[in-house]
Amino acid sequence: MSKGNGHPFSWAAIINGYNAAAMASCPFSAIPEYLGERAYPEDFIQGARVTHVWTQNPVLSRHVAEASLIETVVERPEDMMGAVDAVLLARDDAENHRRFAEPFLRAGIPIYVDKPLALSRGEAEALFAMAASERHLFSCTALRYAAELVPGAEQLARIGRVRMVDAWVPKYWDTYAVHAIEPVLQIFPDLSKVRSHNLAIVGGTHQLNVVAENGMVGRFTSTGDAMSPIGYRILGDSGYLDLVFRDSFSAFKAALIRFLAVVRGQATNIDRRETLDVVEFIQLGRRS
């Protein structure tokens, strides 16, 4: 489990349901809050179970297991092999993703790698090269499935030709910039065709500015310790549109459903080129 990331609690609970008393002491207070707003079982994922858990701390592992109704705590990640159909690598320290994902990829076990997949294109390509097929490695920010971050056709028509997208996230570039980059590139893929870029880093704040080949401008900011919503503003000739992320449960649920469908052969995976474009933007925002 990586610092500041509660996904082992939340992802497992969205699939398994949860023990409200144990979840109340989860160190991420937002998780029991948004779980408590949903009805079980109808709002939760059906037809799958999280059956095994590992973290680097056995006490923490037992807490996750109790809170998210997981049957088995293992001493090593590899102890899950032979007992599971797929793996959730629910940690966002991308520098450790290869270390944890490689044994499962080499064994042909599908894995959902938490965001961001990697901090450099080369590392992302190395991970993809380990996957036995397109369905064996899934990775994204769940915010690509957040309905509130997808502009409607009528909304876009009202603001006219899009000239600029200004996106922002709190916290730190390596772990949170993906929440701004991936949803924006999904809507405006031409931004990934970068003509020029520049980067400003002041303390813990990173701001990446890009100009696309078509002239569109993108600005991506992680604010470090300063408070910020997650969202973006689309600026057009006739107006602007603000989109702000609000619903963690629905986004996580949608991403998990997509992963399960990919594993089962019921849906196509995210195009690897899209993921590599996202990683390239993350890499651009790390250079001084």
Image: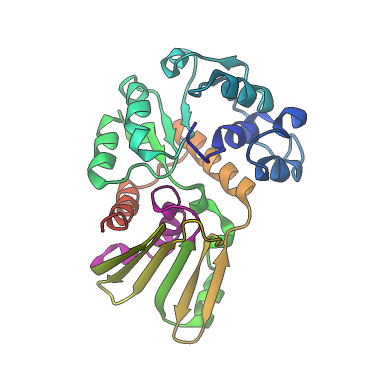
Residue 7, located in which quarter of the rendered image? top right
Q: Residue at the front extreme? A: 203
Viewer can see residue 42: yes
Residue at (42, 63) in percent of width and height: 221
Magenta run includes residue 177 = yes
Spot occupied by residue 224 in the image (x, y as percentages of width and height) = 46, 56
Residue at (52, 43) in percent of width and height: 255
In this picture, residue 95 sits left or right of residue 166: left
Magenta run includes residue 171 = yes
Query: What secondary structure prevails in the magenta region?
Result: helix
Spot occupied by residue 33 in the image (x, y as percentages of width and height) = 72, 44
In this picture, residue 274 sits left or right of residue 151: left
Residue at (63, 40) in percent of width and height: 28
> How many marks do you count on the picture?
0
Location of residue 138 with respect to 275 vertically, above or below = above
Look at the image and name its color scheme. Answer: rainbow
Q: Which residues are magenta?
A: 169-195
Q: Nearer the viewer, residue 24 or 137?
A: 24
Q: Quadrant of the C terminus?
A: bottom left
Location of residue 34 with respect to 183 vertically, above or below = above
Location of residue 271 with respect to 192 vertically, above or below = above
Q: Nearer the viewer, residue 18 or 31?
A: 31
Q: Nearer the viewer, residue 205 or 96?
A: 205
In this picture, residue 12 sits left or right of residue 117: right
Spot occupied by residue 210 in the image (x, y as percentages of width and height) = 30, 68
Q: Residue at the bottom extreme? A: 238
Residue 45, located in which quarter of the rendered image? top right
Viewer can see residue 264: no
Q: Nearer the viewer, residue 232 or 51?
A: 232
